[in-house]
Image: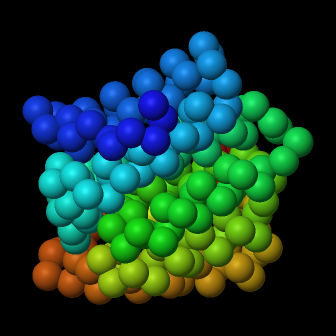
Amino acid sequence: GADAEAPPLSPFGGEQGALIWVQYMRFLRRTADAGHARQLFLRARKWQQSSPATAAGAHPGGTRKCTGWQLYAAAARMEWNADRGSAAIAKKIFELGMEDARLVKDPDFIMAYHSFLVDAGDADNARAVCERGLAEPENSGCERLWHMYAAFEYEQGELAAASEVERRMQAALAAASSAQPVSPAPALHLALLKYGFG
């Protein structure tokens, strides 16, 4: 039954295990109903929270075991695709992920949540998710998160907000790479973020 104990998926790593759960949820969405898929997500979440394959969480520098963030992103997107009139359920799923100390430190999860909020037209919360992710010490010098935030502000924010994010990004990335020689590449990338098509 749907409330049975989640299978251990012991032969699989975190990413492979998450993929299996996601494909199973999609299968139930197609062949059963939303209720069955939601119950399976709860089982998958138990696996994600207890599996050794996802236990390591995120580490500085982007080297980490898979945290299982794909479960939350896939479940939220399925809810959003089923009812584009309301993003409430999808947001609740992502917020469940934000309660997990490993996921809030995982840049991939933060980027997935931010992308969803942008697609849903929720700029204020998209901005807030960037701030919440970057507030984690492990993410403070994460180039991918800063570039995502800067690109978002260049496209949707006010000039003052974009300039402030740019200033903070440059300071954070400089601090994170203080032991490395300065190169022109960051300035070039910044220009591409600012003047690109997104």
**Residue at the spot x=67%, y=64% of the render?**
126
Q: Is residue 125 left or right of residue 95?
A: right
Q: Position of residue 114 (x, y in %)?
A: 60, 57
In the displayed orientation, state which residue is furthest to the right: 85
Label total for image: 0
Q: Nearer the viewer, residue 133 or 97?
A: 97
Q: Is residue 9 left or right of residue 189?
A: left
Above/below status of 139 relative to 185: below
**Residue at the spot x=57%, y=33% of the render?**
37
Q: Quadrant of the C terminus?
A: top right
Q: Nearer the viewer, residue 35 or 11?
A: 35
Q: Is residue 86 left or right of residue 30?
A: right
**Residue at the spot x=59%, y=40% of the render?**
38
Residue 78 placement: quadrant: top right
Above/below status of 137 relative to 157: below
Q: Position of residue 106 (x, y in %)?
A: 36, 62
**Residue at the spot x=26%, y=57% of the render?**
50
Q: Position of residue 15 (x, y in %)?
A: 27, 39
Q: Quadrant of the N terminus?
A: top left
In the displayed orientation, state which residue is furthest to the top: 31
Residue 13 in view, yes or no: yes
Above/below status of 22 relative to 152: above
Q: Position of residue 19 (x, y in %)?
A: 35, 31
Q: Nearer the viewer, residue 3 or 28?
A: 3
The coloring applied to the image is: rainbow
Residue 118 in view, yes or no: no
Q: Nearer the viewer, residue 29 or 157?
A: 29
Q: Is residue 104 left or right of residue 131?
A: left
